[in-house]
Image: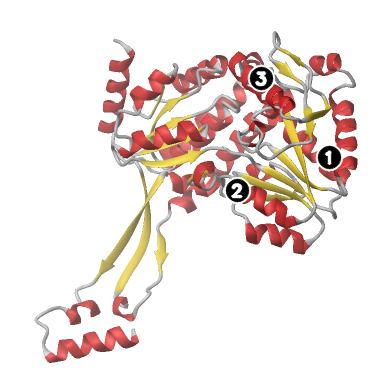
């Protein structure tokens, strides 16, 4: 059987297996998944190291801990999430009616996941889909083959194929899968591919969640505590070597703080990762660029910026054979440079100074709405000015990226940075159809307005429309 036939048969079986599962079966899937992850933590770490040379601590936090947290929250709250939610009455005309929301599974859903956090961004949505009672087909990234193969093994060992299946391969597999009328598609990746997914989904009117990216700015105003900002930006920019959709993409810093910031950040990068390029290449705390194509893309962004007048104020060295670029700070940035037009997705950090917050607002609003805005400030007025005059999927004050770890917050973007929300209860809702339910008894006040429209009926309608 070729892969096309295998996909067709799997999709057909999942569609036929349309019986609803209750809380006990959903819990069973979550528990089995949780046990498999705990039993295979070392294999998960090894697979990530082979694909991205990720530091073990990053794997524990951003891949394993995060997914286990999603499972724990789902297990703890699933009964409450599944319980019908009573809805009030907006008019006295419905006084005799009962109304509620009933969450039902969407059906057969497709999860297409990326390479940068391959376990997290595959199994996290899977947890939400299972909690909501769906059948799932997964297409992981071909750029992280070791993690994808391990997840395929996990799916085979934990689930029956009528509940969860996985198909490995390149973009041709994704194209084949998109030919099918899924009830929901959950995609994490770049905005350009997101548009392709959206176009394919429109053929079947499949609902969509798109977790995309964009250029997430970090604002540092004249009241900011620079050492705190430096410490947090070092972590936020360098985790997974900057290959993160919510990585700080560029810095907007008040001109009075720029020199101090560059000096402090340069020193901190050396302190954390090594004083020389040789030391940084040997650091066990820095990952690698995923492949040669992405290395060359980053190299082009760096070289083009320098040609256009940017100045390297820290870092800049690279090792093509080992797919490594050291964390690099760039000054003398012009807003029309290529590096300020594309999402960087790597360890390059442009620094732009400003005189007043209006400049920041203008720079941010001239670009597509970001997935996140970060701001370091001690001024409530400045913070509120940015909140009121910009739009983004999320905003974090005096920290970077940590909102992703808060599973009580809905995570997602706006327009080109994403559509829909995930995490915790919001992920459960993403994979659920909120079915509006209403029950009436034999007598209904609405019935008083039924035709024939006698003079008495007209008076009732007039009374209702004016006062109820």
The image quadrant of residue 133 is: top left
Compared to residue 235, the image places residue 52 above or below, namely above
Of the numbered discs in the image, which one, if any, rests on residue 389?
A: none
The image quadrant of residue 460 is: bottom left
Of the numbered discs in the image, which one, if any, rests on residue 289?
A: 3
Q: Residue at x 54, y 18 (%)?
A: 143
Dot 3 falls on a residue whose secondary structure is loop
- Give the percent coordinates (x, y) of residue 308: 71, 29
Disc 1 versus disc 2: nearer the observer: 2
Compared to residue 319, the image places residue 85 above or below, namely below
Of the numbered discs in the image, which one, if any, rests on residue 230?
A: 1
Residue closest to the eye, 251 or 323: 251
- Give the percent coordinates (x, y) of residue 441: 23, 72
Residue closest to the eye, 452 or 241: 241
Residue 173 in sight here: yes
Q: Would you name the residue on which mark 2 appears?
A: 366
Q: Residue at x 90, y 31 (%)?
A: 267
State the quadrant of the C terminus.
bottom left
Dot 2 falls on a residue whose secondary structure is loop
Q: Residues within 10 Å of mark 2 (few under 14, many from 20)?
A: few
């Amino acid at each position: 059987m070729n892969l096309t036939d295998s996909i067709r048969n799997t999709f057909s079986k999942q569609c036929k297996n349309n019986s609803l599962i209750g809380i006990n079966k959903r819990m069973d899937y979550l528990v089995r998944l949780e046990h498999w992850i705990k039993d295979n933590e070392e294999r998960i770490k090894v697979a990530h190291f082979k694909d991205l040379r990720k530091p073990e601590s990053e794997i524990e936090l951003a891949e394993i801990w995060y997914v286990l947290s999603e499972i724990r929250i789902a297990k703890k709250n699933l009964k409450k999430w599944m319980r019908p939610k009573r809805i009030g009455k907006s008019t006295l005309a419905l006084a005799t009616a009962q109304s509620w929301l009933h969450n039902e599974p969407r059906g057969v859903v497709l999860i297409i996941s990326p390479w940068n956090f391959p376990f997290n961004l595959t199994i996290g949505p899977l947890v939400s889909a299972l909690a909501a009672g769906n059948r799932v087909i997964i297409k992981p990234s071909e750029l992280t083959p070791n993690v994808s193969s391990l997840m395929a093994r996990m799916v085979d060992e934990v689930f029956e194929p009528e509940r969860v299946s996985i198909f490995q391969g390149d973009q041709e597999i994704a194209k084949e899968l998109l030919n099918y009328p899924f009830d929901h598609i959950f995609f994490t990746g770049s905005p350009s591919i997101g548009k392709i997914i959206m176009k394919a989904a429109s053929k079947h009117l499949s609902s969509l969640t798109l977790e995309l990216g964009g250029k997430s700015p970090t604002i540092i105003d004249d009241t900011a505590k620079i050492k705190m900002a430096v410490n947090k930006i070092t972590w936020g920019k360098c985790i997974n070597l900057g290959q993160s959709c919510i990585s700080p993409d560029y810095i907007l810093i008040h001109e009075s703080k720029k020199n101090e910031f560059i000096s402090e950040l340069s020193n901190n990068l050396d302190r954390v990762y090594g004083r020389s390029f040789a030391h940084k290449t040997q650091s066990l705390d820095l990952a690698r660029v995923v492949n040669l194509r992405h290395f060359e893309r980053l190299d082009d962004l760096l070289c083009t910026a320098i040609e256009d007048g940017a100045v390297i104020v820290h870092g800049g060295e690279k090792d093509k054979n080992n797919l490594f670029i050291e964390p690099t700070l760039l000054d003398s940035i012009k807003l029309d440079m290529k590096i300020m037009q594309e999402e960087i997705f790597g360890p390059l950090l442009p620094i732009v100074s400003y005189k007043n917050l209006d400049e920041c607002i203008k720079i941010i609003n001239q670009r597509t709405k970001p997935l996140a805005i970060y701001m370091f400030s001690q001024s409530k007025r400045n913070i509120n000015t940015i909140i009121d005059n910009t739009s983004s999927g999320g905003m974090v004050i005096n920290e970077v990226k940590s909102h992703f770890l808060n599973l009580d917050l809905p995570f997602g973007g706006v327009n080109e940075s994403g559509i829909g929300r995930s995490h915790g209860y919001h992920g459960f809702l993403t994979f659920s159809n909120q079915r509006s339910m209403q029950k009436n008894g034999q007598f209904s006040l609405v019935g008083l307005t039924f035709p024939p429209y006698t003079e008495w009926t007209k008076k009732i309608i007039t009374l209702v429309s004016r006062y109820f």
